[in-house]
Image (tube, rainbow, N blue to C red):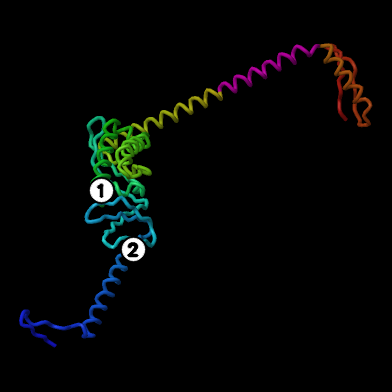
Amino acid sequence: MALYSDSRGPVINVGGNPLVKVIGAGFLFLLIIIFLFNSVIKVPTGAVTVLTLFGRVTGEVLPEGIHVINPLKSTNDLSIRTQEIKESASVPSAEGLVMNLDTSLIYHLNPEKAADVFRSVGPRYLDVLIEPNLRAAIREATASHSANALYTGEREMVAKQVFDQLAAKVGQRGVTVESVLLRDIQLPLTLKASIETKQQAEQEALAMNFRLQKEKQEAERKRIEAAGIRDFQQIVAQGISTQLLEWKGIEATENLAKSPNAKVVVIGNNKNGLPLILGQ
C-alpha cells in the first residue's frame, strides 16, 4: 500500500509482505550453499593442489584427499606421479656425424616444490623446463663420444652423462629425474655396415687367438706327457738288470712246475740260462 506525505514523495511499505521475506531467506540460503560448496575440494590421487588468491600463489600445497579452503581461493592440480617422456632427436657425434637417438626420461614433480614450480614455470613445466633441457643434455653428451662408441659399448656412459646434467638443471627447479634410458641409436647405413664388419673381424680374430691358444696348450700337454713317459722308461730301464731278469725267470719256472697243468720244462739255455717252458 502506498502512503503519501507533503514533504516526501510516495513511500512503499513492504514490512508486512511475507513473500519478500521468503525470497530474501531463499537467496541467503543459496549464497550459503554456494559458499560451502566452494569451500570443500577434493585433491585427486597422485596429485597435489596449489592454491592461488586473486592470481597470487599463496604457497599452500594440499595433498590428495578432502580439504576445506577459503572459497575465494582457486585450485590448481599438478601430478606428482612418475611420468615418461619419449624423445627422438637427430644428434651429432664427436666426428660430426648425425645420428637418430631415441631417449626415454623417467621423472616426477617434487611435491614440496610444487608451489615454486607453478609460480616460476607454470603448469606447462614439461614443455617449458624439461624437454628443452633434455634435448640440450642429449646433444652435449653425444657430441663428446664417437659414433662407434655410441653404437657399441658406451651407451650407459652417455645415459649417465645425460642424467647428471639434466638432474643438476631441473632438480633444483623442483623436478626429480629418476632415470634416463637410451632406447635406440640409428647410424647412417654406410657407417653401420662398416662398424658391423669391423666387429665381425674382431670376433673372428678373437676366435682364432682362442684356437691358437688352445693348440699351444694341447702341444704343451703332449710335451709334458712325452717327457713323463721318457722319464718313466729311463727309471725302469735303470732298475732292470740281467740278474733280475734271470731271477724272475727262475721264480716263474718254479711256480709253473708246481702247477698241476701238464707241461714240459727244459732247463738250460746257452744264452742266459733261463729255462724253456713248453706247453702241453
Q: Is residue 122 left or right of residue 254?
A: left
Q: Residue at x 38, y 30 (%)?
A: 202
Residue that carries the numbered disc 2 in the rendered image: 41
The percent position of residue 145, horizontal first and vertical second, equals 30, 31
- In this view of the protein, which residue sits in the foreground, 178 or 229? 178
Question: Above or below — where is 175 with respect to 5?
Answer: above
Provide the major secondary structure of the magenta segment: helix
- Is there any visible trace of residue 57 in the rendered image? yes
How many angstroms separate mark 1 from mark 2 (CA)? 21 Å
Crowding at dot 2, Cα within 10 Å, few <14 / some 14-19 / many 20+, comes out as some
The percent position of residue 169, horizontal first and vertical second, equals 29, 38
Q: Is residue 4 left or right of residue 244?
A: left
- In this view of the protein, which residue sits in the foreground, 114 or 53? 53
Q: Quadrant of the C terminus?
A: top right
Element at badge 2? strand
Q: Quick check: marks 1 and 2 in contact, CB under 8 Å?
A: no
Residue 72 image-quadrant placement: bottom left
Element at badge 1? helix
Q: Residue at x 23, y 85 (%)?
A: 18
Residue that carries the numbered disc 1 in the rendered image: 119
- Is there any visible trace of residue 188 in the rendered image? no
Q: In this view, which residue lies farthest toward the bottom?
A: 1
Mark 1 or 2 closer to N-term? 2
Q: Which residues are magenta?
A: 219-241
The percent position of residue 243, horizontal first and vertical second, equals 84, 11
Q: Quadrant of the N terminus?
A: bottom left
Question: Above or below — where is 187 with respect to 63?
Answer: above
Looking at the rendered structure, the kind of residue marked 1 is: Arg
Q: Residue at x 32, y 56 (%)?
A: 49
Question: Above or below — where is 236 with respect to 160?
Answer: above
Q: Residue at x 63, y 19 (%)?
A: 226
Looking at the rendered structure, the kind of residue marked 2 is: Ile
